[in-house]
Image (spheres, rainbow, N blue to C red):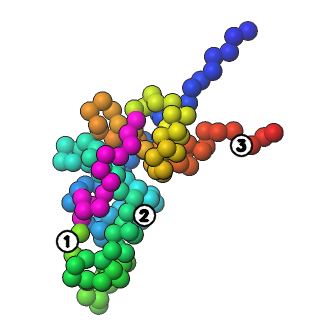
Amino acid sequence: MSTVKHIVTARDVMTKEPVCAEPSTTIRQLARLFEENEISGAPVVDGQGRVIGIVSKTDLIRRCAEGTRERAPGYLFEVICDQGGEDEELIPEPLVCVEDFMTEDPAMVNAETPATEIAKLMFERRIHRVIVVDEERFPVGIITTLDVLGVFPGGEH
């Protein structure tokens, strides 16, 4: 009796239709995008929808911690945390956009890439997410370290 072993691929573990950011997305908009979608990172796409980078909460926090030339680091944290209630004056947002701190040349794979290769790529590059793209670099999914860990057996001995 022959058994065919299924190779787990990116298609099997990815989150389809990932939420994306644009280079012109401001830090406040990015923080809101992460919060509303309960995500910690997103592909960055150009005007045609092709992947040009990736951005994460870690990138956002690091950028806020740096501050700007005109403002101390704490100011950017106030900007992204400000809720802007009716009686509150909205804190003016400095022109800090995703393109200023995104990671260019993100790790990308196609939908047929084996999960074992994705795990190796994440380990070697010390990254927590990989973008699944089609042949024209349009994002079709995203894979996080937790997605990859879910592929491995649950430790039964």
Q: Which mark is residue 58?
A: 2
Can residue 106 be found in the magenta stretch? yes
Indicate which label's residue lies in the foreground, 3 or 2.
2
**Does residue 88 appear in this view?**
yes
Q: Which residue is mark 1?
A: 95
Q: Residue at x 37, y 75 (%)?
A: 65
Count of all numbered marks drawn on residues in the image: 3
In-image side of 80 versus 38 (left or right): left
Q: Residue furthest top?
A: 1
- Side of 32 where 150 appears, left or right: right
The answer to which of marks 1 and 3 sits earlier in the sequence is 1
How would you rate the neighbour count of disc 2 (Cα within 10 Å): few for under 14, some for 14-19, many for 20 or more?
few
Amino acid at pointer 1 = Leu
Up-down: is 22 above or below 121? below
Instruction: Identify the mark nearer the N-term, 3 or 2.
Output: 2
2 and 1 marks in contact (CB < 8 Å): no
Residue bearing the label numbered 3? 154
Q: Is residue 25 visible?
A: no
User: Residue drawn at (60%, 45%), measured in percent from left and top?
Assistant: 149
In front of the other: 128 or 88: 128
Q: Tell me the SS state at disc 2.
A: helix
Q: Is residue 102 magenta?
A: yes
Tell me where the magenta segment starts and ends, as one range.
97-109
x%, y% of residue 130? 43, 44
Extreme residue in the right direction: 157
Can you name the residue that lies furthest to the bottom here? 87
